Amino acid sequence: MLIDKEMRLAEIIHHDFTLLPVINRFDMHLGVGDKTIAAMCDEKGVNVDFFLTIINTFHDVQYFPAQHLKQFPATMLVDYLKQTHLYYLEQVLPAIEVQIENMEKNCAIQGNTLILLLNFFKEYSRELTHHINREEEVVYPYIIALEKTIETGRVTGDFDQRMKYYSLTNYKQEHENVEEKLFDLKNLIIKYLPETRNDAYCHAVLRELFGLEHDLNNHSRIENLILLPKIEEMELLYKQIER
Ligand SMILES: [Fe+2]
Ligand SMILES: [Fe+2]
């Protein structure tokens, strides 16, 4: 089902609950009443076409209109990606840590598996945070500066220097490393957790990890398949600007 602008927000949240944090990233909150997507986007000053494209890519993994997504301004894409980072750093990672601690308190698991799990999670959390910081400090400002330079047609010496030292070579690899680590974390619980009678606590952690994985896959797909090619195309345009 493709979500369109005449649908009501309440209806799509009922239909796919995982869309709720995505809707949140556009400053839309619970208590949506009977508002349609078009009305809500209008109220929040959100580009409805962009909203629908993002929501639909999240809702249906088969739906990924790369050419269409690439046409949105870099600033719009980056704003959305930054909101997603905030969600990971301020909501998801702290929630998972609390849930692992709950497991520790309530599951009476023998041995040091839970300490191992908590340490592994903290390591993962550090790696993801480091990756996010690099994007916010280097990658995103670079693409925005590139877009602005092309729009104004004015190249400054400073930017020429910046481009020379900039490299995206390891960027995709970094995404793969973060993904692998999350998979290992899930596996640690699925395969190696000693038996416990309080399964609900363990299920809660796993549910959160699977949710994070689904969200991160969508996020990295936009970065790998939209942001990177967009940078490459813009770099070509940049080189054509007359000096
Ligand atoms: Fe990111
Ligand atoms: Fe990323």
Image (cartoon, rainbow, N blue to C red):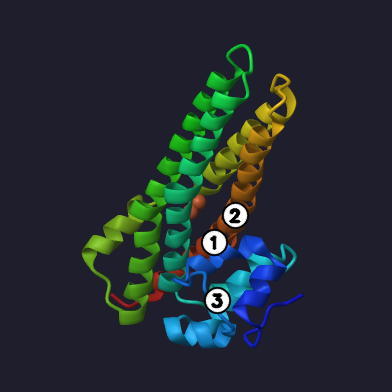
Q: Residues within 10 Å of mark 2 (few under 14, many from 20)?
A: some
Closer to the chain start, of discs 3 and 1, is 1
Left or right relative to 42: residue 195: right
Q: Is residue 18 above or below residue 126?
A: below
Residue displayed at 52% across by 60% down: 228
Q: Is residue 240 above or below residue 61?
A: below
Rounded to the nearest angstrom, the CA distance separating label 2 from label 1 is 9 Å
Residue 112 at x, y percent in the picture: 58, 14
Residue at the outermost top position: 111
Residue 162 at x, y percent in the picture: 30, 56
Residue 26 visible in image: yes
**Which of pointers 2 and 1 indicates the residue nearer the eye?**
1
Question: Disc 2 designates what residue?
Answer: 215
Label 2 SS: helix
Residue displayed at 27% across by 72% down: 155
Label 1 SS: helix
Residue displayed at 51% across by 47% down: 92
Closer to the chain start, of discs 2 and 1, is 1
Q: Judge by depth and name the residue closer to the eye, 117 or 201.
A: 201
Residue 31 numbered mark, or none: none
Q: Judge by depth and name the residue closer to the eye, 157 or 50.
A: 50
Left or right relative to 61: residue 131: left
Residue 21 numbered mark, or none: 1
